Amino acid sequence: MPEAGEITVLLRDWRAGDPVAIDHLFELVYPQLRQIAGALFRGERPENLLQPTSVVNELFLKLIRQRSLRFEDREHFYSLSARLMRRVLVDHARSESRQKRDFGIPVTLRADLAWVEARPAEMIDLDRVLEELEQLDPRKCRMVELRFFLGFTAEETAELLSTSKATVDRELRFVRGWLYERLHES
Amino acid sequence: MTQDAENWELLQELFHLAEVTPEADREQALAEKCPDENLRRRALKIFIASNPEEPAKAPPAEDSSVGSRIGPYTLIRHLGTGGIGAVYLVERMAGGAVQRAALKVLAPHSAGSAFIERFHREQHILASLDHPNITRMLDAGLSDRGQPYLVMEYLDGVHLDAYCDTHKLGINERLQLFLRVCDAVGYAHRNLVVHRISSPRTSWSPPTALSSCWTSAPPSCSSPTAA
């Protein structure tokens, strides 16, 4: 188990650009996110499953109780979890496309957790385009990850990023168009 | 992409300007804001991509088009305007009998390669589906003015929720109807088609048969050919 304050420190390091920090955090959150993603990929009924948000919420509270995380770090913590969820999905997509089981529907980015039915090749494309977005506008990339990968509502996303729902909606409208555009022109 | 990096902020401003400007004034408003035509075009493309379901403004000349012809079809009545075009009740003479159908024509102002591609995809998807509860495609073609159109079965029904309410259906009867919609949706899913805006408003209950009216096939529809 992580020591008191350890996650806080790791998150700070991650935000400060330390690539090693993310690996530590990764080990902590990844297995739990993978479990949800795995169940979804096996086609289990989504309504019977824990949502990624509730798993991450539970983990967050646990870490707070253990004092390995401070409440002020919640935005970092959730942003990181969303990034990790993206990684889980992309890893899955890569292994799927290696197995040449590439069927499904294109990424839509419309409903919450729209990626559930994404086709592996499209997931990988989306990941690549999000990488570009990260370079252009890290905040918008985080917004996409929180909203579409972790499944937060626009209100929750706004609260985490200390902004208004209207801003999140507005920025995501642009981002969605931009992502579609980038996906289709490449 | 580097061009976006240089103009990232301006691109967003243009995008949001496009959002709040009525379509007729859009090009003009953007041109006043930004002299760079390429950038304006890019902002508009992003804007269009962000709104797959944006209802196109009804073409101004729509009423005058009633009575005119598209291909072998005579336009009888304007039924509605969807994401990328207008839908008309049409008639044609078939072997001495009058055949009625719904004709969807791409709005002239929507003509752009992305729209045309989507329209063709919709045609393709509709043609590939054969289910008693999904409206059948009857015909497709190009008008004299080069506008793509497609012709579907015409359902003289009401929205499903209105149907349930006016007939005061109980929970069992509503669920029976719902199962039939599920059957159609399930069939489409098995054919790798997802109707992203299924709702009581896109499902119709004509007097005799329940049909799900697939009026729009946005980009989430894919054919199984993409491997």
Image: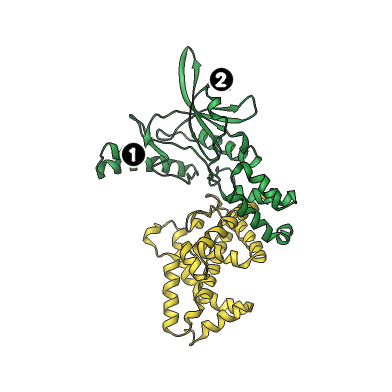
Chain A display color: yellow
Same-chain status of marks 2 and 1: yes
Left or right, residue B14 beside residue B88: right
Q: Position of residue B153 (x, y in %)?
A: 45, 28
Task: Give A12 or B225, whichever is nearer the viewer.
Answer: A12
Q: Using the rendered view, name the quadrant where residue B59 is placed.
A: top right
Chain B display color: green
Instruction: Give SS at disc 1.
Output: helix
Question: What amino acid is at disc 1?
Answer: Ala
Q: Position of residue A55 (x, y in %)?
A: 43, 70
Question: What amino acid is at disc 2?
Answer: Pro
Q: Badge 1: few (under 14), some or many (20 or more) residues near its Cα, within 10 Å?
A: some
Q: Position of residue B14 (x, y in %)?
A: 65, 54
Residue visible at 59% across and 64% down in the picture: A140
Residue at numbered disc 1 = B162
Residue at numbered disc 2 = B72
Q: Using the rendered view, name the quadrant where residue A138 is placed.
A: bottom right
Instruction: Give SS at disc 2.
Output: loop
View extreme (top): residue: B96
